[in-house]
Image: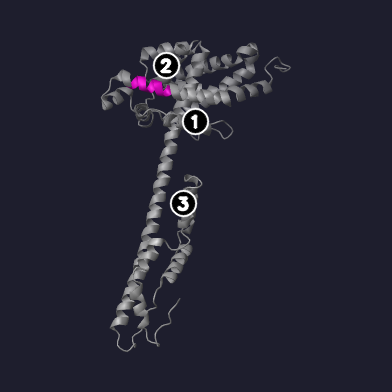
Amino acid sequence: MNREQTEKLDWDAFRYITDEMTSVEVEAFEKQLSTDQASREAVADAVELVQAMASSSEHDKVSVATRERSHSRVSRLAWMTLGAVACLALMSVAQGWLNHGSDGGNQPQLPSVASGELAQLWSEARDDSPEDEWRSEWLAEEEESFPVGSYDESEDGSSAPSWMLAAVSSQPSELDAIELDVPSSGVERIE
Amino acid sequence: MTTADDGKLDPAVVAALYVDHGEQLRRFLLGLLRDEQLVNDVLQATFTKAVQVGHTSQEKSRKAWLFRVAYNEAMAIRRRDAVGDRVVRKLAWTKTTSAHPADEPVLRFETVEMVREAMRDLPPEQLQIVKMRIYEEKTFAEIAEELQIPLGTALARMRSATGKMRKKLQRHHDET
């Protein structure tokens, strides 16, 4: 059997198993199957190919679903972190406002928050997160997805992200000024 | 030694035949019957016959003999159960299911990977036809209408795509 004949046989087998033959063609092909071993093996090969293509699509669907789930997890984590940072920032601003407005230091004061402390809080919040289990799972998946070398260790999540530190340190003079106003009877500054 | 004392094929020979050809035979039967359960039944009947009368076949043509027996058994079941009347248009049967007993071979991971790799190398217009036919289970007539191309063009693209994938698979089989 030459190459052309083999290719035609493979194509016929594919059309047969995908029901793309007319009833007359099916009848003729099945008659051929009763005697021709090459045709039988072509059917087996066509089934293998179509099964592999179909399985490939199933795998892709699973991959996409996993990826989407991972992204939604990252999204949740990002929003939770953003919320925590916003709360801390509000507390700082409120404290500053209270300190400025106080006349004798009799009012209770909230502790000031410096960038170092914020970084520590960030790390603790990440370590204590109830989502740790799935985060580990996600990190494992991500490690599999990214080739070695594409991972930037400076952004490994073990310290506060640079954008958060930048946001906190953007008004250092104001924070310092607030801290200078703290009377001796106030809460101790944590450094 | 290929025969036992009673003149029948040695069970070890039949077992070796199953190891060598069982997987290919299963796929062939799946193409004929489109039903895992029926395939299992026919496969069992075929190897039972191999034990009973396999010794009457020539050793060099034993593979073809097995396929012929399997074909006859499958067609008998189709006639008996009128399987042919229940035309399976969808490709759901191509998906591997849990109907496989644990000790029987399933579609190999390497085969799927090989095909996926071959699909990545396909020209976009061919890949589109493959996806529409296999994943979306559209007929070539539907694909041609949707893409506004002649039916012959849709068929030619699919034929070219399957040919490329088949060659890649064949090379892989030859290497392993």
Residue drawn at x 42%, y 11% is: A28
SS type, badge 1 = helix
Res. B133 image quadrant: top left
Q: Are marks 2 and 3 on the same chain?
A: yes
Nearest the eye: A87 or A164: A164
Nearest the eye: A112 or A174: A174
Q: Are marks 3 and 1 on the same chain?
A: no
Residue A12 is tagged as: 2
Q: As shown in the figure, which amino acid type bears the numbered disc 3?
A: Trp
Residue tagged 1: B114
Q: Measured from the top left, where is residue B86 in percent x and y?
A: 39, 23
Magenta stretch: includes residue A121? no
Residues at marks 2 and 1, CA–CA distance in whole angstroms: 22 Å
Magenta-highlighted residues: B154-162
Residue tagged 3: A138
Q: Measured from the top left, where is residue A158 in percent x and y?
A: 48, 61
SS type, badge 2 = helix
Look at discs 2 and 3 and give the one toward the viewer.
3
Residues packed near mark 3 inside 10 Å, few (<14), some (14 to 19) or many (20 plus): some
Residues at marks 3 and 1, CA–CA distance in whole angstroms: 27 Å
Residue A70 is tagged as: none
